[in-house]
């Protein structure tokens, strides 16, 4: 593990390259801010490309939404403890991959987190910690091991009544991946899907350089310190710089350990770089829960995956193979 000075802090990815040939659109999708950028020769083709990406993202939202009573996800949740539910292959495979990540992370990432009782509040109204018993009971229905998949019949069954699945820790990344795949099929040679901080990139900027993500201070997202190239790669960040509570001098994140019911501590932000945004999204949450040493040990064993962690003392920790450059190195 290497440690870098404070100026290497990373929190919210900020695109650095733009100019002639880059067309962008900002909009709200999946309840979050999205920015879709494509490199095209004219604005008409670019607008059509972005329209197609928006349609695809909205389709995915319809598929995975637990708020839409007509979605396959809602049907699975309604039938928890009752019967298996037949679903589309797309949703089945997303759930299958999610469970694989749960096994890799020993449950630090778990789509059954949606079963958790909401006993922690990070809106300033919480004056004391919940009791240990309340915390224990809050996660009684959580557990990826209780999701039963039947690939032959394409069914999903939640064993415990009252269980739920949700895709808050992986859904935006998956949407970014699918939008990227669609645009590549349409012949778009380069672009970026920014799904509220979960980025997926391909190709090169119009000037021939790699797309670059800025490394910024998690407590001051307008101050940039360093750069990370992300050509044909994805990056996702989890952070508690705004949503947290402090009890007895301990800062408790809004990111809660689905196994214990206790919020994560000791970390301000985690950024994961991976071949796909879906994987980066899920692993960023998992590393936040796992902690610095365990999290980086896992990341170092995954090919093509890197991470930057900022601890609650301002220290920066990186995985073994990540490539980052200071601004001085970039411009001299």
Image: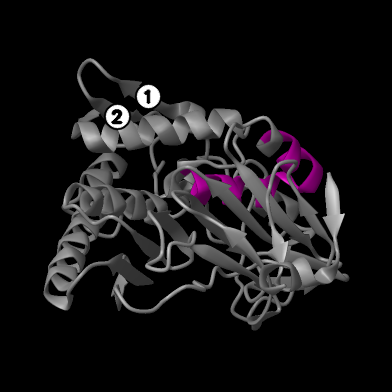
| Circles 2 and 1 in contact, beta carbons < 8 Å | yes
Tell me the CA gap for discs 2 and 1.
6 Å
List the residue tagged with mark 2: 156
Q: Which stretch did the figure color magenta?
A: 279-298
Q: Nearer the viewer, residue 65 or 114?
A: 65
Q: Nearer the viewer, residue 294 or 74?
A: 294
List the residue tagged with mark 1: 148
Q: Classify residue 11 as left or right of residue 246.
A: left
Asked if the stretch drawn in magenta spans residue 229, the answer is: no
Residue 315 visible at all: yes
| Residue that appears at 53% across and 60% down | 118
Q: Residues within 10 Å of mark 2 (few under 14, many from 20)?
A: many
| Residue that appears at 33% across and 78% down | 20
Q: Nearer the viewer, residue 241 or 299?
A: 299
| Residue that appears at 42% across and 68% down | 207
Residue 217: % across, % down: 71, 75
Q: Residues within 10 Å of mark 1 (few under 14, many from 20)?
A: some
Q: Quadrant of the N terminus?
A: top right
The quarter of the displayed image where residue 259 is located: top right
């Amino acid at each position: 593990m290497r440690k870098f000075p404070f100026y290497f802090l990373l929190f919210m990815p900020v695109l650095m390259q733009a100019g002639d040939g880059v067309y962008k659109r900002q909009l709200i999708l999946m309840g979050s801010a999205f920015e879709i950028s494509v490199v095209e020769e004219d604005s008409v083709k670019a607008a059509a490309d972005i329209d197609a990406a928006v349609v695809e993202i909205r389709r995915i939202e319809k598929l995975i939404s637990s708020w839409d009573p007509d979605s396959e996800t809602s049907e699975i949740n309604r039938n928890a403890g009752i019967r298996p539910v037949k679903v589309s292959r797309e949703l089945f495979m997303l759930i299958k991959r999610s469970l694989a990540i749960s096994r890799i992370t020993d449950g630090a990432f778990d789509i059954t987190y949606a079963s958790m009782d909401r006993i922690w509040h990070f809106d300033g109204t919480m004056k004391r910690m919940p009791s240990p018993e309340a915390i224990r009971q809050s996660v009684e229905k959580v557990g990826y091991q209780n999701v039963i998949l039947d690939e032959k019949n394409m069914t999903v069954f939640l064993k415990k009544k009252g269980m739920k699945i949700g895709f808050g820790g992986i859904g935006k990344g998956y949407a970014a991946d699918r939008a990227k795949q669609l645009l590549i099929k349409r012949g778009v040679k380069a672009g970026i899907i920014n799904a509220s901080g979960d980025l997926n990139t391909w190709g090169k900027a119009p000037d021939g350089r790699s797309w670059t993500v800025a490394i910024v201070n998690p407590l001051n997202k307008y101050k940039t310190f360093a750069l990370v190239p992300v050509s044909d790669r994805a990056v996702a960040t989890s952070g508690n710089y705004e949503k947290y509570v402090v009890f007895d001098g301990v800062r408790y994140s809004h990111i809660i350990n689905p196994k214990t019911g206790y919020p994560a501590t000791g970390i301000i932000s985690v950024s994961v770089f991976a071949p796909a945004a879906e994987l980066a999204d899920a692993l960023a949450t998992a590393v936040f829960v796992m902690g610095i040493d365990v999290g980086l040990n896992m990341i170092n064993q995954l090919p093509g995956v890197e991470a930057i962690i900022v601890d609650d003392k301002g220290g920066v920790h990186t995985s073994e193979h990540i490539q980052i450059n200071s601004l001085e190195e970039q411009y001299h």
